[in-house]
Structures are given as C-alpha cells and as structure tokens.
Amino acid sequence: MDKLVRSIKFPMFFDPERLKKDVYKIIDKNWTNHYNTNDYSGKWTSIALMSQNGKSDSIFALPSGDEKLVPTEILESCTYFQEILDSFLFEKTAVRLLKLDVGAEIKPHTDNCLGYEDGCFRLHIPIITNSKVEFILDGNRLIMNEGECWYIDANFIHSVANRGAQDRIHLVLDGIRNEWTDHLFFKEADQNDFVRPATEVSENEKQLMIAELKRMNPPNLDAILKDLE
C-alpha cells in the first residue's frame, strides 16, 4: 500500500462562520456516544445529518441493506450543511457531525474498505478545532483547519487526540466513488496512486474483503472483485 494516497487537502473552502452557525443551532441536541467504545477514551459523540431511518441518533457509518439515506430532523434547520451536501454529487453512505471533547482520544485504528481504492471514501470538513488537536494518519500529523475539506484513507492506521481547550467538531461524509469524484480526486493526484498494489492475502482475508465489498456495493464492484481474483 506504499504508493496509495493517504490524504488530500482539496482546493475548496467553506465559510467557517456559516458552519459554526449551523452547529450552534443544534449544539444542545442529543449527541449519541460513538459505538466503537473500545476505540476511544473520554467523550466522542455524533449526530447524524442523514440516515436510513431519518433519525439523528442512527450514527452507524456502515448502513445495512440497499435503503438510501434521507435527511434527519437535525438537517432541516441547517441550511448551510444542506448547501454543502447538495454540492457533493455522489451517493452518501454516512453524513455525521463528530464531536471529540477536550481531553478525549481516539486510539490508533483502521477502518476496513474505506479508501478511494476500494470505491468508497471519507471526507472531513473541520467546523470547530484548535491547534492542539493531533490527527495522526500513517505516522504523519495532519493539520486540518476550519472550513477546509480533506480526504483521508481510513484503511491506514489513524488516531486523534484533543489536547486543546475547545471541543473539536467535524462534518464527516462517507460516499461512493463515481465519475464526478474521479474528476475531483484525479485533479489532485495521479489515478494510478489510487490503485491497490497486488499483495498476498490469505483466503480468509480475501473472503472477508469480498463480503464487505458486496455489502457496500460500489459502482465499480465487478472490477474490484476481478482484481481480487
């Protein structure tokens, strides 16, 4: 995986004040504790802006079945978030606000099949952050500022620690790769840098990967499965 692109800071910028205005509208709503309780210490919570059942406490990053996401009651009052989501022309599989409280840490971990080379991807838009947030991806620290838009390949080990005096809140979008996103990504890096090098994997690992890919059902599923053969 040495040549794969780990991260991209896209040449787009969102108004931090408008982002914060939407967050402050719902800051006192019910934030749900993140479900991966073994992966963090302190307080890490989320609100879904879109989910399969339209409820803001449905914060799972991996939706079940083929049912599409719909706006939650939270998104209805957040007009700038709606504008941003409408500007991204790809199918969303998760749309959440993630809040990492002061002193909280997300332990080093990986997220399976969540790199652009898999046909799926994750974007981060920082809304509230501080200079003492330490986001480490594959051994390198990423400085993600308010209003920026970042891609991270979550297949690589990553961790986050909020050592500052202010809670960190990101808008996090998971999506399915398509022609529109190819144009966006390939302007920033060569398309060959999003191709997973051939590696020897056990048959059990291969079957787990195939099962996960079939469940996520990206548009280029057949091509990915052929590469795994």
Image (cartoon, rainbow, N blue to C red):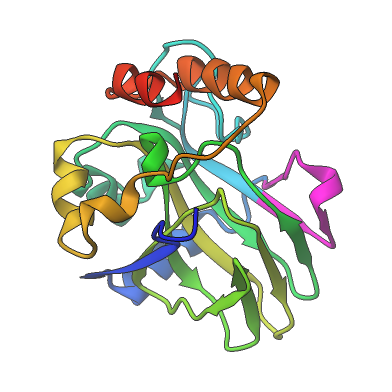
User: In the picture shown, does residue 189 fall above or below 49?
Assistant: below
Q: Residue 41: name its quadrant.
A: bottom right
Residue range corresponding to the magenta coloring? 31-45
Q: Nearer the viewer, residue 38 or 146?
A: 38
Above or below, 168 relative to 33: below
Q: In which quarter of the image is the C terminus?
A: top left
72 falls in the magenta region: no
What residue is drawn where x is 63% and y is 79%? 133
Point out residue 56 in the picture as x, y percentages from the top left corner: 56, 35
Q: Which of 114 and 62 is in front in this view?
A: 114
Q: Which residue is drawn at 59% across and 38% down?
A: 112
Where is residue 122 drawn, in percent x and y?
Answer: 44, 48
160 shown above or below 81:
below
Is 186 or 3 nearer to us in this picture? 3
Residue shown at the point (65%, 19%) measured from the top left: 203
Give yes or no for residue 36 being in the magenta stretch.
yes
x and y percent of residue 110 in the render? 65, 49
